[in-house]
Image: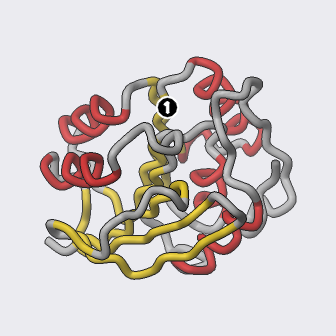
Amino acid sequence: MRVIAGKYKGHAIKAVPNHKTRPTIDKVKEALFQMIGPFFDGGRALDLFAGSGGLGFEAISRGMDDVVFVDQQYHAIQTIRENARILDVHNQCQIYRNDAFRAIKAASKRGKTFQYVFLDPPYGKVSFEDLCQALDEFELLENQALIICEHSQDEQLPDSFDRYTMVRREEYSSQTELTIYRYQK
């Protein structure tokens, strides 16, 4: 695994040393960042189900000010910490071992808000609509925030719901699909 573009382009990052995570492949990661804007002028992102942190570290490399990484697996959290050390970006990372819904509630208590949210849970295990409703309920999203959902092609997400409107949907490989929503307050 590697960082594709930006300040840390070409730097290798470690994968989680088990088969419980599914890292986003480079082709999908590159396409995702081309869709949401290849580079950022600051901002804050939330990387839920972060795994090795590949999406969050890519965002930092491309100009994001800071990223909150959340995963409930011990080995994933250790890998994120190691990758933050490798890239020397500790000051731009907040890393939490927690369930996604508990992490959303905790971030709200800390007064956090986000312009970007990466949702990449195990395929078919978590409802994207429930996650998005929790993000809205706990007021974690800034107006016009983008929510990037990586999911199985078998899981069809709606074009819109509540305060979310789909802005893009793309299929990759035989299984992976990206759906991007814009949040409107």
Compared to 169, does 113 lie above or below? above
Determine the residue positioned at 25% across, 65% down: 142
Seen from the viewer's position, the closer of residues 114 and 50 is: 50
Can residue 4 be seen in this snapshot?
yes
Determine the residue positioned at 77% across, 57% down: 3
Compared to 98, does 54 lie above or below? below
Determine the residue positioned at 51% across, 49% down: 120
Position of residue 162 measured from the top left corner of the image (x, y, whole percent): 14, 66
Count of all numbered marks drawn on residues in the image: 1
Determine the residue positioned at 59% across, 61% down: 59
Report the residue that reaches farthest toward the front: 154
User: Which quadrant does the C terminus fall into?
Assistant: bottom left
Position of residue 90 measured from the top left corner of the image (x, y, whole percent): 60, 38
For label 1, the residue is 71
Q: Quarter of the image holding residue 166? A: bottom left
Query: Is 17 left or right of 10, judged from the image as shown?
Result: left
Query: Is 1 left or right of 44, judged from the image as shown?
Result: right
* Amino acid at dot 1: Asp
Seen from the viewer's position, the closer of residues 65 and 130 is: 130
